[in-house]
Image: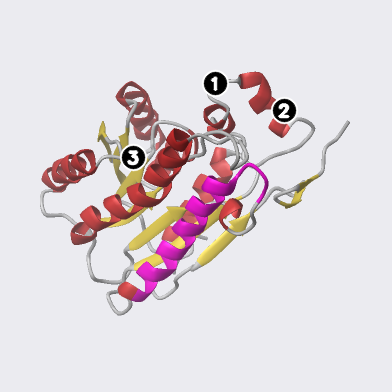
Amino acid sequence: MKNSRRFSLKNKWILITGASSGFGAAAARSFGAEGAKLILGARRVDRLEKVSATAKKSGARAALFHELDVSRTDSVEAFIAWAKLKLKSQPLHVLINNAGGAVGLDPVASALDADWEAMIQSNVLGLLRVTRAALPLLPHDAGASIINIGSVAGRTAYAGGAAYCAAKAGELQITRALRHELFGTGIRVGTIDPGLAETEFSIVRFKGDKARAKEIYAGTHPLTAEDLAETMVWMASRPPHVNIDEMVIKPTDQADVGKVFRRK
């Protein structure tokens, strides 16, 4: 029997950043399966076209896409202006701030400014830019949600992760601040902080070194993009009076950032 207390996502507009792969692409499929209408943004437009097609096959009522680079204010503003035109005065009910990532795993003594700046731009400033631009599109009524995708790295530091841990800690505090700022509007604000998850994340972190990225997951059963996507849908579909503040999700093979069970 279907739970009538769920907030229905059918025909609701969902905006997903970083939608060309990983968590974002999986979210497009999962929200699509709910009969939602999607606005997808990422830098790799060729991949967005494929994600859009897959989301429609999953059941999405619409799956529109446009180039988006969250590290550039002009790109964010152009994307949201385009989205506003496509919405045609309809409200945006869910904003998924997924764009982000890690670059490098070097200690502070030898890390590169460019890597630090890339992580702060995408994980912190990008989140702020998109949220600021999209807030006027969210209705001040029951059911609207902002869901930010963080990381356990924002809660526990590790060697080689100084900038990334700082960036994700920033995401966590932005989420908490937004919850205070939007108090009384009916807009729900939450974060999902995953642990070890196998996507393109480590390939990007290690700058295309697939062998090194593969070692991260060797002997483990990590989370999948689908695990996170299903959690996003669950969070967004809670009854309107329910706000899930923070969720930490790790595979059973991971007790903490530095404690992972590996099968031989």
Q: Nearer the viewer, residue 141 or 152?
A: 152
Three-letter code for the amino acid on which mark 2 is drawn = Glu
Q: Single out the residue that lies furthest toward the front.
A: 109
Q: Nearer the viewer, residue 192 or 173?
A: 173
Query: Residue 264 sits in which quadrant?
Result: top right
Compute the Cα span from label 1 to label 3.
32 Å
Residue at 38 percent across and 36 percent down: it is 19
The location of residue 169, given as percent across then percent down, is 51, 58
Q: Compared with residue 120, is residue 190 higher up or lower down, i.e. above or below?
A: below
Q: Secondary structure at mark 1?
A: loop
- Judging by the rendered image, the residue that carries numbered circle 3 is 60
Q: Single out the residue that lies furthest toward the right.
A: 264
Three-letter code for the amino acid on which mark 1 is drawn = Gly
Q: Secondary structure at mark 3?
A: loop
The location of residue 178, given as percent across then percent down, is 36, 68
**Residue range corresponding to the magenta coloring:** 158-180
Residue at 41 percent across and 38 percent down: it is 118
Crowding near pointer 3: few (<14 within 10 Å), some, many (20+)? many
- Judging by the rendered image, the residue that carries numbered circle 1 is 208
The answer to whether residue 36 is visible is no
- Tag in front: 3 or 2: 2
Between discs 1 and 3, the one toward the N terminus: 3
Between discs 3 and 2, the one toward the N terminus: 3
The location of residue 162, given as percent across then percent down, is 57, 48
Q: Nearer the viewer, residue 31 or 43?
A: 43
Q: Compared with residue 208, is residue 242 higher up or lower down, i.e. above or below?
A: below
The answer to whether residue 77 is visible is yes
Q: Secondary structure at mark 2?
A: helix
Three-letter code for the amino acid on which mark 3 is drawn = Ala
- Judging by the rendered image, the residue that carries numbered circle 2 is 215
